[in-house]
């Protein structure tokens, strides 16, 4: 039997599924918003933390990779207020 730390329980896998579903829903709404409450690097970090887990199922890793690709292809929006010089 493998040590406990290398096995993902069904509870952990379900939590990852819920996180990925939440991130997919959030990105679908904020990716083109001009006034994001949280910037894209925040969302990228959340997805990268999930993607770096060695406990993901292949389907979960695929979803995480597609979410990262979506963030990378997001248009850079101009800041709402210009920087003072």
Image (cartoon, grey):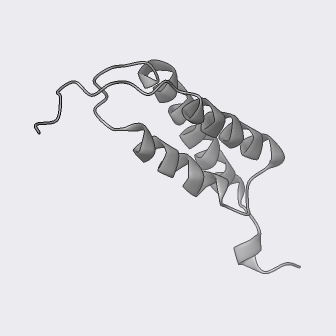
Seen in the picture, residue 7 relative to 84 is either above or below; the reply is below
* Closest to the observer, 35 or 51: 35
- 34 horizontally vs 32: left or right: left
- 29 horizontally vs 65: left or right: left
Q: Residue furthest right?
A: 1
Query: Residue 27: in sight, yes or no?
Result: yes
Query: Residue 21: in sight, yes or no?
Result: no
Seen in the picture, residue 72 relative to 47 is either above or below; the reply is above
* Closest to the observer, 20 or 7: 20
Seen in the picture, residue 38 relative to 27 is either above or below; the reply is below
Q: Quadrant of the N terminus?
A: bottom right
Q: Quadrant of the C terminus?
A: top left
Q: Residue furthest left?
A: 84
Q: Residue at x 44, y 18 (%)?
A: 32
Q: Estimate the x, y position of residue 8 in percent, counting from the top left.
A: 73, 62
* Closest to the observer, 21 or 3: 21
How many labels, in total? 0
Q: Quadrant of residue 84?
A: top left
* Closest to the observer, 32 or 78: 78
Q: Residue at x 62, y 35 (%)?
A: 67
Q: Estimate the x, y position of residue 64 in percent, counting from the top left.
A: 66, 42
- 84 horizontally vs 68: left or right: left
Q: Quadrant of residue 36?
A: top left
Q: Residue at x 38, y 24 (%)?
A: 77
Q: Residue at x 27, y 28 (%)?
A: 79
Q: Residue furthest front?
A: 85
- 31 horizontally vs 18: left or right: left
Q: Estimate the x, y position of residue 83 in percent, counting from the top left.
A: 16, 35
């Amino acid at each position: 039997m493998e040590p406990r730390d290398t096995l993902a329980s069904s509870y952990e896998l379900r939590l990852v599924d819920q996180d990925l579903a939440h991130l997919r829903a959030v990105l679908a709404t904020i990716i083109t918003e001009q006034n994001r409450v949280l910037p894209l690097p925040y969302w990228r970090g959340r997805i990268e933390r999930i993607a770096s887990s060695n406990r993901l199922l292949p389907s979960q890793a695929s979803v995480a990779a597609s979410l990262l690709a979506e963030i990378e292809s997001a248009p850079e929006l101009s800041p709402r207020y210009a920087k003072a010089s």
